[in-house]
Image (cartoon, coloured by chain):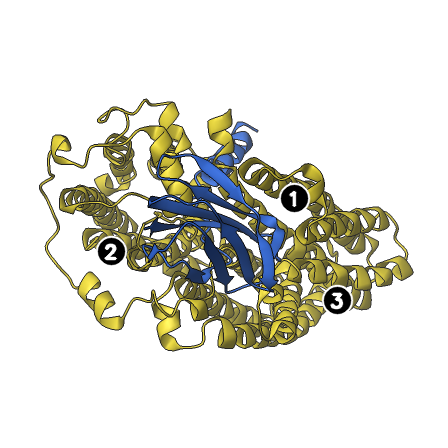
Chain colours: A blue, B yellow
Amino acid sequence: MKLRWLGVLAVCGLALALPRYAHAHAMLVQSTPQAHATVQGPEISIELKYNARVDATRSTLVLVAPDGKTAPLAASQSGPGTLAAKAQQLNHGGYVLRWQVLSSDGHVSRGEIPFTVK
Amino acid sequence: MIWLLRDFDFLAVLLRAAALGLEALMVGGIAYLLLVAIPATSDADVLKGCRRGIRRAAAAMVLVQTLYTVVDALVLVGSSGMSAREVMTAAFFYAGATTILVSGIIWLAMHFASRWVAAAMAPLALILVGSAVSMSHSVSRLEHSVFLAAMTALHHLGTAAWIGAMPFLLVSLKRAKFELEQTRLARRFSNMALVSVATLVAGGLGMAWFFVGSWSGLYGTSYGLLLAAKVYLLLVMLALGAGNFLIVRAADRAPEKLLRRLRRFGEAEIGLGFTAILAAASLTSQPPAADMAQDRVTGQEIVARLHPAWPRLKSPPVAALTPPSSIENAVEAHAFGGEGVSDDLDRAWSEFNHHWAGLVVLLAGLLALASRLQVAGWARHWPLVFAGLAFFILLRADPENWPLGPRPFWASFSQPDVLQHRLYALLIAGFAVFEWGVQTGRWKSPRAAMVFPAVCALGGALLLLHAHAQSDVRDEVLTEIAHTPLALLGVTAGWARWLELRLPDRRDRTVASRVWPACLVLVGLILVNYRES
């Protein structure tokens, strides 16, 4: 009996040792702006194209400003695998666009796109 | 507890693996009941055993799928600020709810012995497969999604009717009272398995055509490497299955002995099969190789990385490593972009760790082989070598954390890599103690002897999912090129040791007894040659 419980504990231990890194499932294949690009402000159009169908209503876009403040962006679906948004009143400096998408098979993937506004 | 919740993201992968395994068991059990057990036998005990197995799988599926759906929902709510209502109206939630409902109906129905009720399970099994397919890569593809969904369904059905049904064959063989009945069951299952394997392979090839697309996709991406691992497992299972195929055809000559051998090979087939299902769960969380055209590793890069070189026997000092950031920054960076960039000294540290671990495992393998060949009696103490390895991992695997670094011991558990390494250290220590007791005859219990194959096989299976999140995708693939063979050798060693302990024939046991020490030696050689640049 003791061995059985030790076995259960061992399995749980091995299970908890399971690595977390679920890779990006819906992969970003093209973005506007591109990573590390320099763009003209104060208003920019954002378009993110993925390799899979995404659920725009359950996906999020967050813009991180040069001072570290974050602001959510309203994302719309411009195609089965495409998210679109607009960012306004951007000052000069380095920004980071953090995206999180839910693909239609239920997997969540995340990423970030740094860019500069001149 | 909040820091633990951050790791629930990876718990979803484990639950997905459990759900896929239970789906195979339920659908396989129903296929076995309808196509093998009911036509082949009138023994009520056999049919009762099958229905009980399906009920248990169904009950477990209700629990696992509920947990999986809840964990997925919690991750979404926690990380995106979505409301519970928004999450509960998502497609994946409906698919999960369908699986839970259908599993509940199957659980209830399997309380009844009626053959009409059993027949009614067939469409429910297809709904289960459909629900699983709706949460696969196929349906989210922008092109060819219908064809890919069909191929995925075939792959699931083939897996279920072979791997998922096999446990029910073993249960039936144990319960059937007459050898003639056992032979009949084995023959019908063998015929079903032949069709299942063809179906599984056809579905797999169809998916591989679109998801991999080329040889460079197979060897140059994480998806391709996992798929290659599944192919290896399939080939080993087919070798065992071919043995069972011949046994079944010759069973009339010496039924009792041959059927016992069939059961033992069947156990290993089941273990390897569910390992392949675990790899499949990991595949569902990887982007298909066909989408990774920009980030593929080339053949030349692989050759350069694997080129034999003298191991690193001297470590850089801890103080020379990259200064660690705070735990909060490290966890956030890990969530969005993987580990931070390592410099040459960080890589030297990691390589030193792997090379010395390799020397330890190589020594253990050689001693185990010497013990098997009865060259030296003291060689049977080889498991103690692993106790030293466990301490080594605990001390050196994560130098930015306690005891070598400034990050606190308990808080550092929020980093997935740290959690993994410490649990592996604990399990290796436990394994060392157990197996030493068995090898030296201090513990004579047959169950104690099963710890080694169980830890080896399960550890190897879960290592297939191990990923050092790297900021560069190509570096990650190059790391996986070393890890994947280690995982497969671990799985092979575990099941070889299992067969050594379980097979009735001495000649078969001797063959198995040479395989697992050879696997340990190969693991040691791979670790000794491990490089990160």
Looking at the rendered structure, the kind of residue marked 2 is Ile
Image height of B151 relative to A28, above or below = below
Looking at the rendered structure, the kind of residue marked 1 is Thr
Which chain is disc 1 placed on?
B
Q: Quadrant of the C terminus of chain B?
A: bottom left
Image height of B179 relative to B11, above or below = below
Looking at the rendered structure, the kind of residue marked 3 is Val
Q: Earlier in the sequence, mark 1 or mark 2?
A: 1
Label at residue B526: 2
Name the residue at 39% across, 40% down: A65
| Mark toward the viewer: 1 or 3 | 1
Label at residue B36: 3
Estimate how packed mark 2 is, as few (under 14), some (14 to 19) or many (20 or more) residues with alpha carbons within 10 Å: many
Q: Secondary structure at mark 3?
A: helix
Q: Secondary structure at mark 2?
A: helix
Task: Mark 1 and mark 3 in contact? Answer it, CB < 8 Å.
Answer: no
What is the C-alpha distance between the residues marked 1 and 2?
39 Å
Task: Mark 2 and mark 3 in contact? Answer it, CB < 8 Å.
Answer: no
Image height of B41 relative to B209, above or below = above
Q: Is residue B515 left or right of residue B269?
A: left
Q: Earlier in the sequence, mark 2 or mark 3?
A: 3
| Mark toward the viewer: 2 or 3 | 2
Q: Position of residue B379 (x, y in %)?
A: 23, 42
Provide the residue designation for mark 1: B69
| Tags 2 and 3 on a common chain | yes
| Tags 1 and 3 on a common chain | yes
Which chain is disc 3 placed on?
B
What is the C-alpha distance between the residues marked 2 and 3?
44 Å
Which chain is disc 2 placed on?
B
